[in-house]
Image (cartoon, helix red, strand yellow):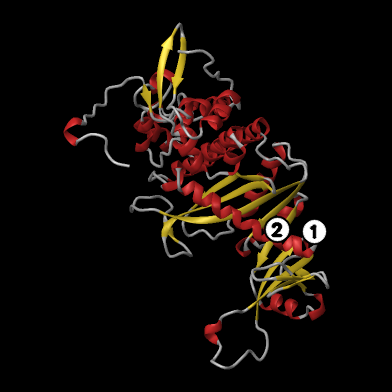
Amino acid sequence: MKSSHTPAAVFAAFDDRNLLAHGGLAPVVRLAERCGLPALVRGKVRLAGAANGAGTAVDAKVMSLVAGMLAGADSIDDMDVLRHGAMPKVFGGVRAPSTLGTFLRAFTWGHVRQLESATRAFTANLVSHCNLLPGGDEIVYLDIDSKVKQVYGAAKQGAEHGYTKVRGLHFQIVTASTPIAAPIVVATRLRKGSAGSAKGAAPLISEAIAAVRKTGATGVIVVRGDSAFFSAKVVAACRRAKVQFSFAVAQRKKIRAAIAAIPETAWTPVKYPKAIFDHDEQRWVSDAAVAEIEHVAFTGKAKKYQVTARLLVRRVKRLNPATVPAGQGELFTAWRFHAVFTNSRQHPVEAEADHRRHAIVEQIFADLEDSALGHLPSGKFTANAAWLTLAALAHNLTRAAGTLASAFHAKARTGTIRHQLLAVPARLATKARTLTWHFPQRWPWAEAFMKLWTAVGHRPVTRPV
């Protein structure tokens, strides 16, 4: 590729009123309206008495924030992306960044909870409208995890140093997925930076379970988490909700003793890197194996918190040639052990493999930080909590748009969906009280885009214009 003209023959002017940079916002905003987001926000979020008119037109302000996030905005100033070219012709009620900042700063913790309630109801509508959780009639995985988001500025409320030694705010998310569906976010919570990973996890899991059931999922629900979330309160919340749980367990004294009690004959080799399948014996010859043993957890707690369930253990041979002196082999096999406490009814090998798929939640962190959670933009804690809630909503809406567009986009990263389906430049033409959107010829993802366009009720051009 090279330039087609000399620099002296190339000119630029920002003067076209009929162009816009994110033509894909049209079907996605329409999708949000079809699933009732403006009405839910009006009905649930009430900023009564807020100064400077911050409590007025909450639906328009939330829709503006979400649309900006869909376009890739990760700060309040970035919301100006909504005020260019032909945007005022096709979207009403777009608010300025300063207005949106005032709106977010008016939030109290109660208002954040109202916004979370509206978001959960909207997510339920979105899941049923777009079939975001296919396979939910059989099994749904809820994955909980937390992350410290580094922030800057001495006035940032709640920012403290936590276990990562980084000054930031600490947020939790719970995602829902199925074996054939990409994850969506069903619950979020922002805490101060020094909060432990599991602080507030039990009520958040209860909210997530209720949210998933409201989507119409009737299958088995399995809550998965790493060892930070293995606590009596979290497991008790799962048992109260009558769902299955699967949590990694740290290698403490009682766990090591339980692992040592597993007989050698109980270990089943599993498919692992460099494993070989023995067809004669119908088993894997592998450097990894899985076994299970019954275990009573939380024996130091009150009797109501004590739980008897399965302890699944995966052992992996230590393979580090650098630690073996030249000419000497190992005297005995050394293993690394990974334990999981679960009440799953699956075969041990399947249950342990299912637990390892909990790592899918890391993809959601990557997606969120590649978009609206690039920053937590306000100095006020509750404003950032509301921003986190809306970032999760925008993620789910992007995922829904991808699901309507194509099988590929249904599981693609949200950044891919944004670049291929939302950031489509368009030119507007009006005629006889109709609006025609003209998109680039030979857009590589035009077919998927038109499926999304027509799925929300818009019409394709069927005649020359």
* Residue 392 visible in the current orientation: yes
Q: Is residue 384 left or right of residue 291?
A: left
| Label 1 crowd (10 A; few <14 / some 14-19 / many >=20) | few
Q: Which residue is mark 1?
A: 346
> In the rendered image, which residue does mark 2 sit on?
354
Q: Nearer the viewer, residue 130 or 50?
A: 130
Q: Are there few (<14), some (14-19), or many (20+) residues within 10 Å of tag 2?
A: some
State the residue at coordinates (65%, 71%): 274
Looking at the image, is 238 positioned above or below residue 43? below
Task: Residue 313: give x, y in percent of width and height.
Answer: 72, 71
The three-letter amino acid code for the residue at tag 2 is: Asp
- Residue at (58%, 55%) from the top-left corner? 145
> Quick check: can you spot residue 232?
no
Q: Residue at x 65, y 46 (%)?
A: 176
x, y percentage for residue 298?
72, 67
Q: How many marks?
A: 2
In-image side of 255 versus 166 (left or right): right
Q: Furthest residue to the top?
A: 432
462 vs 302, left or right, is left
Residue 323 picture quarter: bottom right
**What is the x, y in percent for residue 399?**
57, 39
Label 2 vs 1, first from the N-terminus: 1
Circles 2 and 1: CB atoms closer than 8 Å: yes
